[in-house]
Amino acid sequence: MNFVMSDLVPVLPEIFVLAMTCVILIADLLIRQSGRLATYMLVQLTLLGCSLILVGTHENRVIYAFHNMFVDDLMSDVLKLLTCLALSMMLAYSRLYLTARGLFTGEFMVLVLFAMLGMMVMISANHFVTLYLGLELLSLSLYTLVAMQRDSATAIEAAMKYFVLGALASSLLLYGMSMLYGATGTLELGALTQAIQSGAADRNLQIFGLVFVVCGLAFKLGVVPFHMWVPDVYQGAPTAITMLIGSAPKLAAFAFVTRILVEGLQPLMPHWSAMLVILAIASIVLGNVTAIAQTNIKRMLAYSTISHMGFLLLGILSGSIEGYGASMFYAVVYALMSLGAFGMIMLLSRADGFEADTINDFKGLSRRSPWFAFIMLLLMFSMAGVPPTVGFYAKFSVFSAAVNSGHIPLVAIAVLFSLIGAFFYLRIVKLMYFDAPESHAAISIQPDTGILISFNGLAVLLLGILPGKLMAVCAVSAQQSLLLH
Amino acid sequence: MLMSFETIVFYLFAALSVFAALRVITARNPVHAALFLVLAFCSMAGIWMLLEAEFLAITLVLVYVGAVMVLFLFVVMMLDISLVQLRAGFWRLVLFGAALAGLMAFEMIWVLGSSRTSTGRVAIKHAADYSNTKELGRLMYTDYVYPFEIAAVILLVAMVAAIALTFRRRKDAKSQGVPEQVAVRKADRLRLVKMPPENRARQGLDSTEEVAR
């Protein structure tokens, strides 16, 4: 009825990705190729094309389309661009690793693109229905990707756990959304805020719905006490898929959480802020302490993810524009560090099926390859938050936002446990530089992944020295997107 | 007291669905239970029809009766279900079940009897030419076209995922290579052997048998 052509321009990136995914699905069957190189190039071209369209259709204002179901603003454009970049890097890192394990198939790449489409829908959703559908699109693709390695019992177990707990989380989220709908009579985020602000709606019912929504979000973010799936999935999935789960979806999750809590439920801020305080504290404490006991580096990084998500929540719970900007910066930085760390694990893994997934595999890396040991050192320093790497600046900005909104005891605990957490990151550095290597096998590195990981490690350092530009972009997008009402 | 035709139909369908639902759990034969469930669905569809929700009624019959229940019946018939085994824990669980049923009944009475639920509002009667299906379709393809399309993509992902996870090309599978069959030449299959003629009848017979075998 009121469908207009101008609705299609803001969703052009999504339409392009969907169309190309369908083309690739068919083309992969028809093109004769070795090692899926042609399909791989097509996927990379799709990501490039999507980025170009994003830049080309960018307008410096907030555009709503499809009856306010879809929103196109600076935050969505920035996050979508970074998602394209993260997925492109992830595919480049994992091509040889997956080829050696027989997993680099057309379906793999198609599912990655579908996951990306889900993330894009989540990032620019302005309605509970689109938020939920985007989340399901992403989750279903990820469940399948985790289960792709059918011969591995751990991968199947991880996929089962991920699927069952993910379904539980989705149903919690839906239940909360239906309660909010019952209380306010709308599913659109802007109208939801107005309905809550008007005071006519039942406040108890809103809080009841909010509790379920926050639980669902916490499940998806993997924060304590809803974190049980994270270590098993990170350890069980093939490293390339772990890298995928650990990088770009965190950007989408940030958008998802802020759109629901800040854009939709801003008037209930005191309530959700208090809930997030508990989640953040528990994640930071448990994540950092449990990571110390791990000998598997993928599992260790999983607990590190849990604690990082706790730090990310610190910015959101502070409830200020400064805090939202800091959290967005944290999500971007985390995705970058995660790509580098998992990239390094894949780099050290060999084509004969050897997985460098215990921390002992990093012993004496500096003697085998001083340059890559240095890159890993940068990544670990950044995760621990040691200056001058960007991890320090990310932690500093969320801490300062939380202090400014009066959460001083919370920040004191967070600082203490990030110091404790530094132990297990620095243990990797100690193993690399001061221990004798367990194997002297030459590290075979293709030039493209070698350059990429060097770029990744140096980016962590450079952004740490000059964080101003990225921080400004995050602050401006948070300002534009989240301070509308 | 005079009841309108609609009320009579409602009570008919309601009684039928309660009866069918009871028989679902009391029927001894699982196939009968599944068929009673079909009856319960059909009578519920009738009630929805009375509520002017034709689309939901039709979908219930098409999807649940037509697809889900048929699949369910297949499973019930394929599996060898031992009734004795199914009834084994009955008396042990009956207390728990009764408590759960009581709790649910209490909740429903509480919700339906609360002042918030019964607002005293009466549903608006639509005109005779009002079509529920058309209204739903109009909304689905205009206001909700964006989520509708995403739902379609999710179905596509489910299809890709199901094939990617279950399709396994077996190494020892035997299949027909049509291009090879067509490209074959006489020289590849047929070999002409020159043999001296045999005279002895007895041995000749043996060798024919050999060839036939």
Image: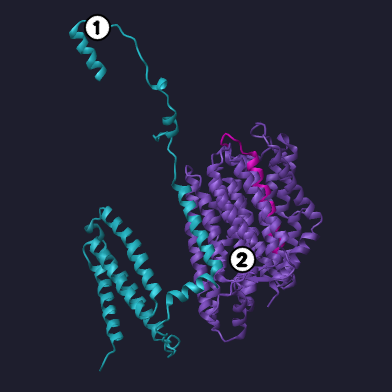
Chain colours: A purple, B cyan
Question: Chain letter of disc 2?
Answer: A
A465 or A185, nearer to the observer: A185
Query: In the rendered image, is residue A273 in sight?
Result: no
Please tell me whether residue A200 belongs to the stretch shown in magenta. Answer: no
User: So how many labels did they put on this image?
Assistant: 2
x, y percentage for residue B65?
Answer: 32, 65
Amino acid identity at mark 1: Glu
Please rate how many residues cluster around mark 2, counting C-alpha atoms within 10 Å: few if below 14, some from 14 to 19, many from 20: many
Disc 1 marks which residue?
B198
Is residue A334 shown in magenta? yes
Q: Residue at x 59, y 78 (%)?
A: A192
Q: Main secondary structure of the magenta part?
A: helix
Q: Position of residue A45 (x, y in %)?
A: 66, 49
- Residue A25 visible in the picture: yes
Residue with the mark numbered 2? A256
Pointer 1 indicates a residue of which chain? Answer: B
Q: Is A244 located above or below residue B138 in the figure? A: above
Question: Which range is magenta?
Answer: A327-354
Which numbered mark, 1 or 2, is in the foreground of this view?
1
State the SS at label 2.
Answer: helix
Left or right, B103 with reference to A275: left
Q: Position of residue B196 (x, y in %)?
A: 29, 6
